[in-house]
DNA sequence: CTGAAAGCGCTTACAG
DNA sequence: CTGAAAGCGCTTACAG
């Protein structure tokens, strides 16, 4: 159906070797030959078969990206960064939705291995020993995004969660708040869980404020409904609170919604600061003050590291800066 | 690096043809041979090279998906549906972010053609003559999602926008509203623009209500900020309005935010109904009543159609049902 | 039941 | 400057 290099060679009266050379900008043919070949290619609308190329070159120009969830806003923004940068360098990206499920992840890894992707980007998930062993067997570069591994030497790009959480809490303190609670992720989560709790505690301690345990409501996930529940529990235990740091924007929106139902006004009664700066932070009522993570940049940076790795260079793990985005959900006291 | 079929054959003392047969569950070997081969495969951790397979079979088990934007919630949910269903059938998906840009789209199409994807899913965008010609040249199945073509015979899966908009408006009318405005997309948009306006007008006409032109604020896009602006203009021109149909959830959230700033209470002063049912509809304050589009189902249905097409069967265009989701942004009068 | 061989569409030494 | 040939890792008639 599609014309092949054979067709081009025949019509141009040259060998396929010559066609291949002009295709790849290699030396070894006269200008005249080049023009002849180019003309035929044009006429035929010939496009080289990347599958055949992949087979001989042993690289496919494809990278696999594994997400715990593709429908989340966070993944979507990271994917956007990855996809854009990859395409700039003529790489394609295959998306995989692991759903944080071991079997699915392994299945995906197997498919990606069969497809001979040139590299793997692993997003927002912990690297288990099992995964790591598969990475090794695949023998291709792996870059971590928005996660890191303490046990395995895998390069990563992320924000410093501890610092980000510190900045959020500090902002609340600077605004005159003293009774500050936190709605957090799981304490067992070594990436987005306890580091953010640590950051909060650090700021509280530094300011000489209460470190009472019940001030942080540790939830199972970072989702909206947990934010609602977290807010309710927190306000029941600590009606004196004037400010809350929610460890994700979704948690913050949940808190805002629960506040609304309880006739607590944000930010008049209670100030709330989020974490992430997803687009929905802007759409919130009131617009959410939050710590921004540069998701797109994280994605493109990961691709740049991946390209270095593929080309045999080193890639250094990178901490990208977070940023305080002030909107209307935090009020001075 | 990775073991090949040659390695397996050598160690199992059989020919590569035999290995290939047991790999593909074809007849033609004794149970004993099979076990021997399987054992070696296991020991070696052998995994067939999908690139080589793709070259001989002339199919890659990969489909390309083109989105106008990968970072949007809507795309993310459709992608989720596509990805899940594709993976169930051992297909991989390559994502492409066209940014609604002609050059980028053509570049992507070229890459996908070189990579010899087995099919194309084209999401939420109009099919131009130029694109259609490329589709034809690629000679692979194309399925449209959340869009359709009036000029070209391309199968699609979508919701009936006219009916959905009608249902939204009707709901407002049923709740006792008569002064109803609309914040719409572009009138030039033949997919999500005028059909929704038509649906609104149909319901208004049927109920004997005003069809005044200024009652529909047609905006450039379906984004949040347009919703804010749309609301402001609408309420200035028509302070008598008690209800508004926003043609997307983002527009609705923009309207709610603008209302909040103008001290207009939702739904007490003005009821608002959205369209899409993105997760943020649930997170809105107040939670947004809206028309749900089954995005995940649209994605998986598209893949199912794609598989039929790839296997030489027919695929019928499908209209999936919308659904009214009642939350708190609409109040009876 | 099994294997030798051709072929998928390319790239790349090698020889001239 | 140019081409014949081997090879990438498979599948599939074909012959036995």
Image: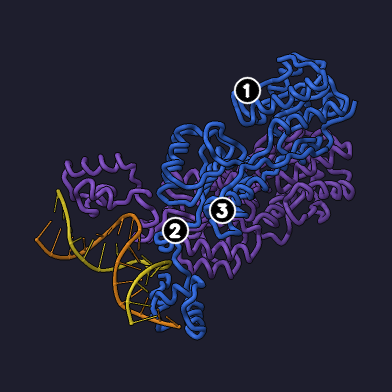
Chain colours: A blue, B purple, C yellow, D orange
* In the image, residue A13 above or below residue A49: below
What label sits on residue B118 in the rendered view? Answer: 2
Identify the residue under disc 3. Answer: A307
Q: Hey, which quadrant is residue A224 in on the image?
A: top right
User: Badge 1: few (under 14), some or many (20 or more) residues near its Cα, within 10 Å?
Assistant: some
Of residue D10 and residue B150, the one placed in the foreground of this image is: D10
Closest to the camera, between mark 2 and mark 1, is: 1
Q: Hey, which quadrant is residue B265 in on the image?
A: top right
Determine if marks 2 and 1 fall on one subunit. no
> Picture coordinates of residue A305 (x, y %)?
59, 49
Identify the residue under disc 1. Answer: A187
Query: Is residue B204 found left or right of B126 in the rendered image?
Result: right
User: Badge 3: few (under 14), some or many (20 or more) residues near its Cα, within 10 Å?
Assistant: many
Query: Is residue B222 found left or right of A44 in the rendered image?
Result: right
> Picture coordinates of residue B247 (x, y %)?
71, 48
* In the image, residue B70 above or below residue A57: above
User: Badge 2: few (under 14), some or many (20 or more) residues near its Cα, within 10 Å?
Assistant: many
Secondary-structure class at tag 1: loop
Tell me the quadrant of the picture where the C terminus of chain B can be found: top right
């Amino acid at each position: 159906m599609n014309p092949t290099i054979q067709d081009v060679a025949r019509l141009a009266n040259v060998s396929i070797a010559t066609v291949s050379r002009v295709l790849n900008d290699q030396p070894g043919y006269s200008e005249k030959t080049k023009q002849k070949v180019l003309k035929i290619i044009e006429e035929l609308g010939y496009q080289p078969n990347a599958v055949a190329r992949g087979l001989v070159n042993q690289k496919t120009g494809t990278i696999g990206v594994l997400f715990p969830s593709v429908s989340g806003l966070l993944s979507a923004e990271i994917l956007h960064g990855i996809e854009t940068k990859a395409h700039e360098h003529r790489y394609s990206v295959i998306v995989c939705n692991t759903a944080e499920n071991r079997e699915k992840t392994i299945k995906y890894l197997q498919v990606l291995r069969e497809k001979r992707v040139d590299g793997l980007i692993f997003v927002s998930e912990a690297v288990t020993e099992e995964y790591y062993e598969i990475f090794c067997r695949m023998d291709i570069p792996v870059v971590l995004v928005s996660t890191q591994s303490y046990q395995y030497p895998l390069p990563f790009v992320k924000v410093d969660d501890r610092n980000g959480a510190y900045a959020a809490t500090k902002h609340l303190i600077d605004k005159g708040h003293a009774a500050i609670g936190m709605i957090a992720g799981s304490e067992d989560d070594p990436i987005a869980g306890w580091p953010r709790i640590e950051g909060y505690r650090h700021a509280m301690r530094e300011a000489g404020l209460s470190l009472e345990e019940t001030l942080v409501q540790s939830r199972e996930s970072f989702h909206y409904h947990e934010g609602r529940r977290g807010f309710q529990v927190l306000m029941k235990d600590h009606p004196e609170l004037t400010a809350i740091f929610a460890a994700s924007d979704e948690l913050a929106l949940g808190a805002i919604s629960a506040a609304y139902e309880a006739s607590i006004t944000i930010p008049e009664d209670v100030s709330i600061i989020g974490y992430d700066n997803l687009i929905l932070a802007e759409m919130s009522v009131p617009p959410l003050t939050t710590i921004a993570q540069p998701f797109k940049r994280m994605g493109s940076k990961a691709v740049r590291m991946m390209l270095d790795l593929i080309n045999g260079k080193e890639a250094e793990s990178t901490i990208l800066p977070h940023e305080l985005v002030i909107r209307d959900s935090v009020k001075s006291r």
